[in-house]
Each structure stands twice: as C-alpha cells, then as structure tokens.
Image (tube, grey):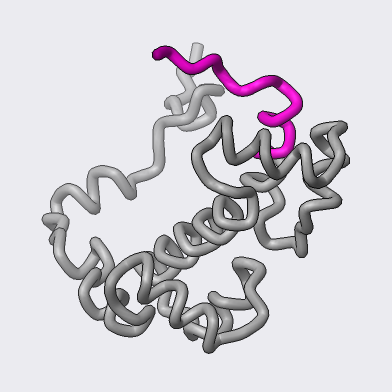
Amino acid sequence: MISAPPNRHLLRAKDLIDARYREPLDIATLARAAHLSPAHFSREFRRAFGEPPHKYLLTRRLERAAGLLRSTDRDVLEICLDVGLRSIGSFTSSFSRVFGMSPTAYRAHHPPAADLARIPTCMLRAYARPAPSMFGEDQPVLAG
C-alpha cells in the first residue's frame, strides 16, 4: 500500500518545528499553523509522519544537541537550554535513551574532526592565501 504524501498544512507545522525547535512549541501552536483542531492535528501528524508531534520535536532538539556536542566545547547545560529544553535531568535521560550514552560520554566518543584530520601546512598556506583582486589594483602600472 502506498501512502499519500502529507498534506501541505501538516508540512507547515513540521517546518515550524524544524525552524523554531528552540522555542516553546505546544500542540495548540502547531495545530494553529496547520489550521486544524489540536486533537485532529495530533492524529493527522502521527498518521503522516509516524510519530506524535511532541516526539518529533524532542527528536529534532536532541539531534541539534548532538551536533553541538560534536562541534563545540560548550557546557552540556548550555546546549540543553540552547536547543529548547529546560531540565538537564530530562535532557540527559532522553539523550541517553536515543543515543545510548550520556551527553558527556557522547562528546568523548565523538571528538571534533579537527582532532582527527590533520591538514598539511602547505595546504593551509595555499588556501589561506588571499585571492587575487578582481579589480586589478594589484596589477603593475605600465608607464606610457
């Protein structure tokens, strides 16, 4: 059986979650974005995307947190708050349930790429060199 693609109104709510995951989003706000009643919206969202809206929102937040843990050295509490979660305890337990380890262990298990990939100095110098000017002011002036 081929399922129909989600209706545009549900995609509006999904896009709202993706764009504003840091903000406090409740079912009523998402349902308004989809122009549906909260109960009908929850049922339709689950049918279209395979999970309830609050779980989709939590998953987006945890994915963003994992990215920040891999790419920054910011404090775990700061990351928790930055992705829109308000409790470090529930953040840690949700993160552990989804990723199989605590946020601190996840960071230790995924060192920054700069620690793993060494770039030769000659390449750094070649790519750090300023590009030639497009306006010709670095060209010699011909006397004539």
Residue 12: in magenta span: yes
Give the position of the N terminus as an image quadrant.
Answer: top left
Q: Position of residue 116 (x, y in %)?
A: 15, 65
Q: Position of residue 35 (x, y in %)?
A: 87, 32
Position of residue 7 in the picture relative to residue 26 (left or right): left
Total labels drawn: 0
Question: In terms of depth relative to the viewer, which is nearer, 40 or 14?
Answer: 40
Quarter of image, res 71: bottom left
Position of residue 133 in the picture relative to residue 85 (left or right): left
* Residue in view at x 55 percent, y 17 percent: 5
* Residue in view at x 32 percent, y 67 percent: 99
Quarter of image, res 55: bottom right
Position of residue 26 in the picture relative to residue 114 (left or right): right
* Residue in view at x 67 percent, y 34 percent: 44
Picture layout, residue 123 above or below residue 54: above
Q: Position of residue 36 (x, y in %)?
A: 84, 34
Picture layout, residue 98 above or below residue 6: below
Q: Position of residue 113 (x, y in %)?
A: 24, 61
Question: In terms of depth relative to the viewer, which is nearer, 15 or 116?
Answer: 15
Question: In terms of depth relative to the viewer, which is nearer, 114 or 136?
Answer: 114
Residue 20: in magenta span: no
* Residue in view at x 43 percent, y 26 percent: 140
The boundaries of the magenta stretch are 1-15
Picture layout, residue 129 above or below residue 118: above
Question: In terms of depth relative to the viewer, which is nearer, 96 or 124?
Answer: 96
